[in-house]
Amino acid sequence: MIGSRCRNHFCSIPDSVRRIASSQRDCDRFFTFFICFLRIFIGNLKFYELFLNYERAMNAPDRYERFVVPEGTKKVSYERDTKIINAASFTIEREDHTIGNIVRMQLHRDGNVLFAGYKLPHPLQYKIIVRVHTTSQSSPMQAYNLAINDLDKELDHLKAVFEAEVARVSGEY
């Protein structure tokens, strides 16, 4: 390599680079940048390969698909269990553990519910399946509707209490 020796570094810098870096300060800056670049590039080669493999292997659905219900799809679908009397499954589209656990706990508060549980079929499928088994005095549809209505009332009450507290605290200041 044809070049001149840099004052503070044990390397040779090509004349073309030397011409670009007109002063010794520019040469030092360029050399520091170049060494940092090499360290980052060589040190992060594994990271770069992982990033490329991640981008190539990325098969997750788009983020909006977690929340937006596709056209022609019902938010909640009902399927009666043919093997067990007074049992059914509710499939709730575009929901996760948050709603599943809340609905399950609300169903457990009903005395006519013998079993209530939920599951996520797959992490990339944004839906939950809520299973309900009731006594003969109630149907799964009645228990589910009662639980949803009770949750709606509780959330309305929580919102009203929160807004009243915000108004009270903001009035103090």
Image: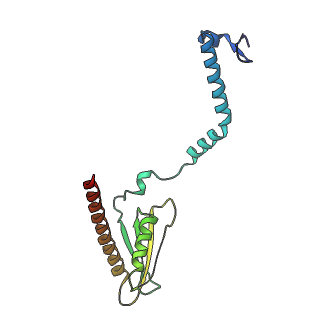
User: At 59% across and 42% down in the image, what residue appears?
Assistant: 51
**In the displayed structure, would residue 124 be above or below residue 157?**
above
**In the displayed structure, would residue 75 be above or below residue 25?**
below
**In the displayed structure, would residue 70 be above or below residue 78?**
above
User: At 28% across and 60% down in the image, what residue appears?
Assistant: 163
* Colouring convention used in this rendered image of the protein: rainbow
Image quadrant in which you'd find residue 145: bottom left
Looking at the rendered image, the quarter that the N terminus falls into is top right
Image quadrant in which you'd find residue 17: top right
Q: Nearer the viewer, residue 133 or 6?
A: 6
Give the image location of residue 87, x and y in percent.
43, 82
Q: Nearer the viewer, residue 57 or 156?
A: 156
- Residue extending farthest to the bottom is 136
Give the image location of residue 6, x and y in percent.
70, 13
User: At 52% across and 63% down in the image, what residue appears?
Assistant: 122
Give the image location of residue 89, x and y in percent.
43, 76
Left or right of 131 on screen, residue 163: left
Q: Nearer the viewer, residue 123 or 44?
A: 44
- Residue extending farthest to the front is 172
User: At 27% across and 65% down in the image, what residue appears?
Assistant: 160
Left or right of 37 on screen, residue 77: left
